[in-house]
Amino acid sequence: MAADLGSTVAVLGQIPALALFTAAMLGLVVGPLADRFGHRPTLLAGVLAASLGAVATALAPSLLVLVPVALIGAGGRSIGLPVAQAIVGTRYAGPALRRGIGLIQATGTLAPIVGIPLVTAIGTLAGWRGAFLALGVLGFVAIGLMLWLLPPDPPHARTAARLSPAAFASILADRPSLWLYTSSLIRNIGVWALFTYLGAFLAQAHGLSAAEIGWAFTATGVGNFAGSMATGGPLGRLPLRGLAIAAPVLIGGCLGAVTLFPASLALVVVLLVLGFVGNGVGIVSHNTLLVDGSPAGRATTTSLNQTCMSLGGAVGSSLGGLLLATGGFPSIGLLTLGCNLLAAACVVPARRTR
């Protein structure tokens, strides 16, 4: 894309960073909006925005046009996952809540496993514009499936949430929630600093083609899927807080080592899988702790977490581009390691008394 639009990888990497910043700001509105007017219609609107953003990206003629176009899809990022988690939070509790959030996260990670090899293959044949157009079409298919399969919201799902900063007052007064949000923000800075430029690293350090890079991203999806499923399954008897502390340590150690130390391609793939197993465990355990203990509405709680994750991703993408231009890929690995160790430390004081 950078070559076709007459830009560089580092500059182009600022566009997803801008989209993540926009998604972070929208998340402050989406949560109270969904709690007040319904989770199902809000979720449908988010998928529609993401689909339109993908189609508009495919049609963008220049880098200047691509910037506002990317902001259209930012609405989908701020709505989709947190509102889906809120739907589970209003229907289930206890172990079922943990399994439900794990399933949402796990099925979401099927996108790298199935989608990235698919769209990189399309991109090889039809260019990156054809790949984004295919993403838009898949989004419209998803909307049709949701209209068919997703039942209406139960009566108790809607609350009198105020569409103002006051909707977050109870969360901001809850110290364990604040520590969890801080951890989520810092963890995503480290993960996205590496993830945004992982394709460029694999091409430069290991000489992979676009299709081969797609399969490497599949490895990250496999790890995410395994970690998400394990948290609601085989790891179901372990304390969520302990998992939320251990997961960033695993992420930082594995993903940081990818660019910090010289390694064979096979070892890099293993480290990516293990690092994203930790990412899956971390997200599910973290989100379950938040939903289960938050004093605010479900969508307000999950959308604020998505805001923290999007903001962390935006800072990580932007900072990763700066480090890439000044210190190279090893400096990105060092940032990933340090951020995740700090994220683990932030969960330690996030203890709730019941």
Image (cartoon, rainbow, N blue to C red):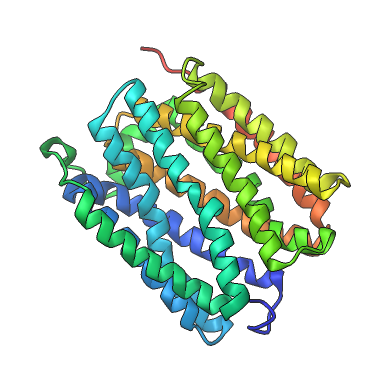
Residue 106, how many percent across, how many down? Answer: 46, 40
Residue drawn where x is 32% and y is 37% of the image:
169
From where the camera sits, is residue 41 visible?
no
- Left or right of 195, for residue 20: left
Q: Residue furthest left?
A: 155
- Left or right of 263, for residue 126: left
Residue 152, how many percent across, how many down? Answer: 15, 47
Residue drawn where x is 11% and y is 38% of the image:
155
Q: Residue furthest bottom?
A: 61
Residue drawn where x is 73% and y is 40% of the image:
270
Count of all numbered marks drawn on residues in the image: 0
Residue drawn where x is 77% and y is 46% of the image:
268
Query: If the image is split into quadrants, where does the N terminus sit?
Result: bottom right
Query: If the image is split into quadrants, where does the C terminus sit?
Result: top left
Residue 60, how many percent across, how many down? Answer: 50, 83
Q: Residue furthest top?
A: 354
Relative depth, front residue between 196 and 138:
138
Q: Quadrant of residue 205?
A: bottom right
Q: Is 300 drawn above or below residue 210 in the view shown?
A: above
Q: Is 233 drawn above or below residue 146 in the view shown?
A: above
Residue 32, how many percent across, how many down? Answer: 26, 47
From where the camera sits, is residue 258 visible?
yes
Q: Quadrant of residue 121?
A: bottom right
